[in-house]
Amino acid sequence: MQTQADLLSLADHVLVKNYRQQPIVLERGLGCEVWDKAGTRYLDFTAGIAVCGLGHAHPEFTARVAAQLGKLVHVSNLYFNDQQLLAAKAITDRSFAKRVFFCNSGSEANEAAMKLARRYQAVVAGQPQRTTFVSTINSFHGRSFATVAITGQAKYREGFGPLVGPVEFIPYNDLEAAARMLEQRTACAIIVEPIQAEGGIITAAPGYLAGLRRLCDDTGTLLIFDEVQTGVGRTGQWFGHQHDDVAPDVMTLAKGLGGGVPIGAIAVSEKAAAGLANQPGGVVPHASTFGGNPLACAAACAVFDLIDKEGLLANVAKASAHLAKRLGELVTEFPGQATEVRGRGLLMGLAVANLPANVVAACRAHGLLSSVAGSNVVRFVPPYNVTTDQLDEAVGILKKALQTGAGK
């Protein structure tokens, strides 16, 4: 039997060394807890980077995915499958959207949204000159060739030029900057996250998303909300923009949509759907071999059903209030290290004075898994069914890390 040390050595020889993975090999999980190969138990406040909203090894989720695995895994989009249709209905029933296109990841969803926007302006609106994508400084929209081009952090774009363009970056939460850009009527779309998660957990200011909606309506620009990290219950509403009572033309989803099974989607208005509509006798505008496969869509159906059945949106709101309160206590207690609590729902962060990676490492040493967001934020994205006791345990571990001076 291979030990954790054996497997870490194997990783050094067989994997491309692109990640900076923490030096543990996780083997199993249950709810909000995971265990590594050495048998060490951790509270998992990463949840696969905001993916495992139901936690690990949820019995009903596991049973439903296993049942689908025994029936039908993949048929391609040459045919319909029942789970694809039911998953699309689950999304449209809970959102502004009228139609859904399925893919396999957040990057793919944002790529599909980009293609839709370009083609909508060229084919539907008859304005092929409108090719510019407007994004925001400090945003994150993926690692694929096109989505890295619209990601507003230069570090992710370095070494990959020339990139897809034209792209213009404007400050987040700045409606005046958005107005100046969109009034030029050169943009096919603007893409914005309701919360800039990877950018440091920056929440849209009151009125910002609604203001963008008005500007897009006035200028004929498509409004895309990247809900890859904020969607499917993470913020305490089904979708992050619903806190602001505003609807986009296109919403991109992934992460929490499949509960850990890879799946992505774009959810679109009837108007925007025309951007990817097939023309009789024409080439299919966009497609995905694995997108909408029965296994991934069965997982998505289970996620929606179980969030409803177990009242998890309410639990997210309750847990969020408790976590924010406890993190706020640390800001008061450690003024030289902890500077601010950020976020909404169970997408929360604690800004620290310096080197959040040191805090993450210190927390791991005491049994808590967290991650870094932006340049100075320790991110907490636990499963939606996290308990108050688990939140208190996590904050207690974080307090130990700060007591060592890890956040200075």
Image (cartoon, rainbow, N blue to C red):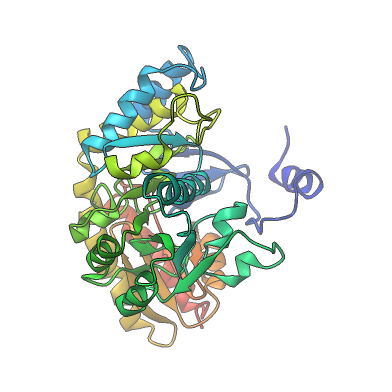
Residue that extends furthest to the front in the rendered view of this protein: 126
Tell me: 53 left or right of 402. Answer: left
Residue that extends furthest to the bottom in the rendered view of this protein: 336
Q: Is residue 156 visible?
A: yes
Q: Residue at x 48, y 44 (%)?
A: 112
* Between 163 and 22, the one nearer to me in the picture: 163
Q: Relative to 64, does residue 163 appear above or below in the rendering?
A: below
- How many tags in the picture? 0
Quadrant for the N terminus, please.
top right
Q: Relative to 336, does residue 264 appear above or below in the rendering?
A: above
Q: x and y percent of residue 353 in the render?
A: 47, 83
* Between 106 and 46, the one nearer to me in the picture: 106
Q: Relative to 135, does residue 106 appear above or below in the rendering?
A: above
Q: Residue at x 47, y 52 (%)?
A: 49
Q: Residue at x 55, y 48 (%)?
A: 40
Tell me: 67 left or right of 316. Answer: right
Determine the image quadrant of residue 192: bottom left
Q: x and y percent of residue 303 in the render?
A: 33, 34
Determine the image quadrant of residue 385: top left
Q: x and y percent of residue 361 in the render?
A: 57, 65
* Between 11 and 294, the one nearer to me in the picture: 294
* Between 110 and 348, the one nearer to me in the picture: 110
Q: Is residue 143 visible?
A: no
Q: x and y percent of residue 86 in the render?
A: 31, 25
Tell me: 160 left or right of 63. Answer: right
